[in-house]
Amino acid sequence: MKFMKTVLIAVGLMLACVPARSQTTAPAPAARGARVPQANWWSQAGGENGPTRVVWAAHKNPETPYKAPNKPIWHIADALKSHKGQARWEQNVLLTRDFDGRYVQMAPGDKSKCLFWADDRAWGWVYSGQVKVTIDGQEPKVLPKGWVFNVAPRLSYCLETAGSEPVVYYITTPAGQVPSYPDTEMPVPVKGYTYEKVKITSTGGYDSFNMPFFNVDEYGASARTGERFLYDGHTSSNLNIGPPLTQLPASTSWGHFHENMPEVWLNVWGNVCALISGEGVVHGEYGDLINANEERWHRATSCPNTGRSIRMAITPRSKEGQVHYFQIDQPPGN
């Protein structure tokens, strides 16, 4: 697959959750003689309903390279194979400006230290086995395969293997940050840092967009659509449903790309086929992590004749809006 070095594109601003007010809404009637203000879409919140503009966008040439541990696709089967025979292990599979993602296996009886992140979330998804998750202010919950957990900032959490089998899960934590601990826990030493006892009054919690636990398998087997479990000003993790397909879209339909940020998907239901510029189509099975690097065109769908899929998107800046750069000769959204 060959992609154009420079293209004219149509640009959309997307706010992943709450749509901005439509520009087509008629203004309220004004009193006789009063001046009616004109709608100004430039001043509205980020959204996908502004007028189409044609702009120039910088597309890195050659394509933005992948730097370890990042690569177009991590197959969880490869991670399991490389750690075969080990009772407990971690495999780093994602490291960006915002996120540090890894597969983890805990042996029966294992329990993590309790810790929290000052200003950002941690969240994870259970691939196999069962894990007991304890979060400040929540009833501890044993999560089997297919469940996700979402830990709000400043809430301490601990993970413990439940049952007699190992648990394998994926977890995302803030990149480049050092955790804090409750005073009952002994911190793990970090080079260049000294832990001091201090006091805080800041709180964390949940709202209409965020929930501590979510059953993805139940969601995938249902007719429900459009649900999310994690969303704030820094982080979004949408559950994007791909409908069943009998064939992939045309190779001339490239999807979109983002400036300055990758788009990452964890395959949590079915099979995902993602077109990534410079890589072609990568085929993701249950548990695989797909990474469309900065400024690379990408388009994710279900794989043909495999039913529908759900990919857990991992992106920053959703609340403020992310610019989607589209091909000029394709329909909106490709």
Image: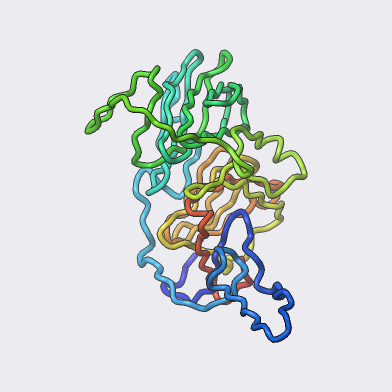
At horizontal 64% and vertical 51% (from top left) the residue drawn is: 302
> Is 28 positioned to the left or the right of 63 in the image?
right
Q: Examine the rendering and report whether any part of residue 334 can be seen.
A: no
At horizontal 41% and vertical 40% (from top left) the residue drawn is: 174
Residue found farthest to the right:
223
What coloring was used for the rendering? rainbow
> Is 76 positioned to the left or the right of 100 in the image?
right
> Is 165 positioned to the left or the right of 67 in the image?
right
Q: Examine the rendering and report whether any part of residue 197 can be seen.
A: yes
At horizontal 28% and vertical 27% (from top left) the residue drawn is: 195
- Indicate whether 165 appears above or below 227: above
Residue 278, quarter of picture: bottom left
Residue found farthest to the bottom:
33
Numbered circles on residues, count: 0
Q: Nearer the viewer, residue 59 or 30?
A: 30
Q: Nearer the viewer, residue 88 or 154?
A: 154
Q: Position of residue 322 (x, y in %)?
A: 51, 60
> Is 292 positioned to the left or the right of 163 in the image?
left
Residue found farthest to the left:
192
Q: Position of residue 160 (x, y in %)?
A: 51, 19
Which quadrant holds the C terminus?
A: bottom right
Q: Position of residue 316 (x, y in %)?
A: 47, 51
Residue 130, quarter of picture: top right
Q: Position of residue 282 (x, y in %)?
A: 53, 51
Q: Nearer the viewer, residue 265 or 30?
A: 30
- Indicate whether 101 appears above or below 23: above
